[in-house]
Image (cartoon, rainbow, N blue to C red):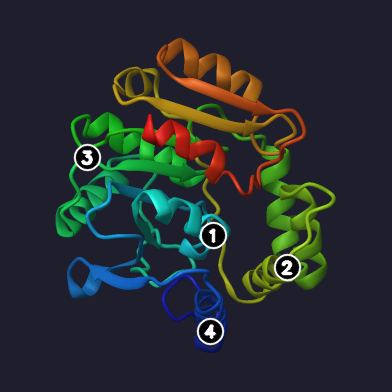
Amino acid sequence: MKTNGLYRTMAGEKALMDFYDRMLESWPLAYEELYAGPQNERTHVIAAGTPGSPPLVLLHGSTSNAATWAGDIASYAREFRVYAPDMPGEPGKSFTRRLSWDNDDYSLWLLRLFEELNLDKPCMAGLSLGGWAALRFASDNPDRVSRIALIAPGGIVNPRMKAVFKMMRYASQGEAGAEKTMRLLFPDDFESPEVMEFFSLLNAHFIYRRDALKPLTDKVLSSIKAPVFMISGAEDAFFDFRKAEKRLLRLIPHAQTLLFDKGRHGLVAMADTIIPFLKS
């Protein structure tokens, strides 16, 4: 039995949300949980940092939630008032309708969120799908964004389908598949029992999205006026970021890039690299 199209059972949904709550209990600083939007399409937002500080919106990647930022949130919150929403249709606490990647769904969702939270030209930082969403929003709403930091973003070049198909296979392999997913996403020396548990819960209970994220068009990328900083890994299994760097700089000449020679898709602890750009 499906509960809402995202989870296999109600028990599975509860298991993932219980895990999410445990992760929030261990966050390194005080935070607020906010809800924005109408009752049938509420967005869950974690807010931290001093009210009145410059705003920063953090957008996590696909098949994840705002707990993604646990390792960096304290660093960001020292400089900004941080808002980390759970993106719709992902394993978080926001509404479950999956937005389309082929129209302006994500831009309209973010615009409503900005208006409800009274965000005036915040900085944005997006990981993977979150990077794609930030770029699309900045193109559709050029006067609503101050700066954009991209971490291993989608939307620049086509994904490597070999890696996508591997992820799909691993999703059906339970805990063994979770271990393989860890090795695909992170460096060999990366260890995190919490991330391992999360992937195991996803494989057991979550229904993965099957459509592939398409690159943004030349028109969309070339219309972005906000300063852009892209951080990526040369050993990313999902995207060829050497090609992405060339395309980004051709279409957004004012962009800055940083390519980690040994980096993979799961780039972690990036706040200290990103904050100087966001504040400059």
Q: Is residue 38 visible?
A: yes
Looking at the rendered structure, the secondary structure element under dot 1 is helix
Labels 1, 2: front one: 1
Residue 235 spot, x, y in % from top left: 75, 33
Q: Earlier in the sequence, mark 4 or mark 1?
A: 4
Q: Tag 4: residue type?
A: Asp
Mark 1 Cα-neighbour bin, 10 Å: few <14, some 14–19, many ≥20: some
Write down the quadrant of residue 178 in the picture. Answer: bottom right
Query: Are the residues at dot 1 and dot 2 in contact (C-beta closer than 8 Å)?
Result: no
Residue 142, above or below 117:
above
Looking at the rendered structure, the secondary structure element under dot 2 is helix
Q: Which residue: 50% across, 80% down?
A: 21
Labels 3, 2: front one: 3
Mark 2 Cα-neighbour bin, 10 Å: few <14, some 14–19, many ≥20: some
Spatial CA distance of label 4 from label 2 is 15 Å
Spatial CA distance of label 1 from label 2 is 13 Å
- Residue under numbered circle 3: 121
**Numbered mark located on residue 196 in the image:** 2
Mark 3 Cα-neighbour bin, 10 Å: few <14, some 14–19, many ≥20: some
Spatial CA distance of label 4 from label 3 is 34 Å
Q: Earlier in the sequence, mark 3 or mark 2?
A: 3
Query: Are the residues at dot 4 and dot 1 in contact (C-beta closer than 8 Å)?
Result: no
**Numbered mark located on residue 18 in the image:** 4
Looking at the rendered structure, the secondary structure element under dot 3 is loop
- Residue under numbered circle 1: 68
Labels 3, 1: front one: 3
Q: Tag 1: residue type?
A: Thr
Q: Which residue: 74% across, 70% down?
A: 193
Q: Tag 3: residue type?
A: Lys
Image position of 166 (left or right of 150): right
Position of the C terminus, as image quadrant, is: top left
Write down the quadrant of residue 102 in the picture. Answer: top left
